[in-house]
Image: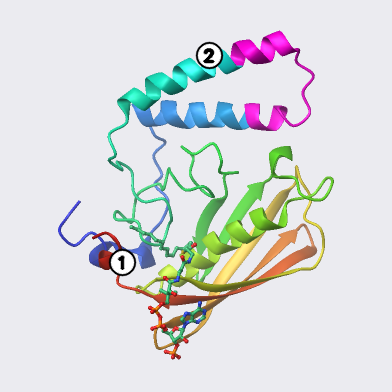
Amino acid sequence: MSDDPFGQSIASLANWVPPDEPPTGQRAALHRLAAAMRIVAEALTDMQADEADLLAAAEAMEQFGARLEATRTGHRPWGFAESAPAGDARAMFDRSPVIGLGNPVAPPLRMEIDGDRIVGRATFGAQYEGPPGHVHGGIIAAAFDEVLGMAQARTGRPGMTGTLTIRYRRPTPLHTEVVFEARVDRVEGRKIFAAGTLHAGETLCAEAEGIFISVDFSRLTR
Ligand SMILES: CCCCCCCCCCCCCCCC(=O)SCCNC(=O)CCNC(=O)[C@H](O)C(C)(C)COP(=O)(O)OP(=O)(O)OC[C@H]1O[C@@H](n2cnc3c(N)ncnc32)[C@H](O)[C@@H]1OP(=O)(O)O
């Protein structure tokens, strides 16, 4: 990473597009592992495996976890956990809890830039359930934070979320592709006002407004 890890990269977010090339090697293996862990996480919500099977899996996972722990370096090789302050604007944000393909917690949300809009698509599994059969409201808020956050980052002087307001209009279904959209409404000094929607098909499930406060991200890394 350069001496100015944010300035140039943040400016270039205005032109950021997801890489075309699929990952290879260790990174592809990480994505496959995270995807497998998502399958396990969802299956745990309603599985019928017996105690012995679960204990065997727990033991194997504990052993694998210990092996992984021993390899940790404290470095962040593939960008930052949130899209806006990524040191490398082309980083794939593997660690994000919302979009990270290397993070089993992430649904993951897939984001793309469409003109002045950010579009995010996700299909939430049962591990994200809040009301029966529907997505937990906090998970929806996290996804809005990410898409609004990416939209405001494209101003070239992104900020941290100051205020995020969600209006939940209809329950958001699990197991259905849903679409988030976000755009910047206006900028007033350091305040960037962004807004977004969440649809399941034609149904408007939620609306969001966010106020992001531009910050000097280089100060956050010191
Ligand atoms: C190493 C990497 C680290 C990564 C770090 C993550 C960074 C991510 C960036 C984007 C990523 C996107 C996707 C996920 C975004 C999150 O989830 S970020 C995490 C959640 N948010 C936070 O943790 C923010 C915590 N809050 C703070 O740090 C500070 O309160 C803030 C927001 C930076 C503002 O503090 P400040 O710079 O001292 O602001 P201040 O000078 O008091 O006010 C400036 C102006 O903003 C207004 N304002 C201040 N606070 C607020 C507020 N909460 N609401 C509305 N307006 C406010 C003031 O009224 C003032 O307005 P004017 O008087 O100029 O009209």
For the residue marked with disc 2, what is the amino acid? Ala
Q: Position of residue 66 (x, y in %)?
A: 41, 21
Does label 1 point to a residue whose CB lies under 8 Å from ligand 1? yes
For the residue marked with disc 1, what is the amino acid? Phe
Query: At 15% from the left edge and 59% from the top edge, which residue is drawn?
Result: 3
The answer to if 157 sits in the magenta stretch is no
Q: Position of residue 167 (x, y in %)?
A: 73, 71
Q: Residues within 10 Å of mark 1 (few under 14, many from 20)?
A: many
Query: At 56% from the left edge and 44% from the top edge, which residue is drawn?
Result: 106
Q: Residue furthest left?
A: 3
* In-front residue for pair 12/36: 36
Can you say whether 39 is above or below 211 in the image? above
Q: Looking at the image, in which quadrant does ligand 1 appear?
A: bottom left
Helix, strand or loop under label 1:
helix
Q: Earlier in the sequence, mark 1 or mark 2?
A: 2
**In this figure, which residue is indicated by the disc labeled 1?**
217
Q: Residues within 10 Å of mark 2 (few under 14, many from 20)?
A: few
Q: Which residues are magenta?
A: 40-57
| Magenta span main SS | helix
**In this figure, which residue is indicated by the disc labeled 2?**
60
Q: Is residue 183 left or right of residue 171?
A: left
User: In this view of the protein, can residue 54 be seen by the observer?
Assistant: yes
Can you say whether 73 is above or below 110 in the image? above
Q: Position of residue 25 (x, y in %)?
A: 35, 25
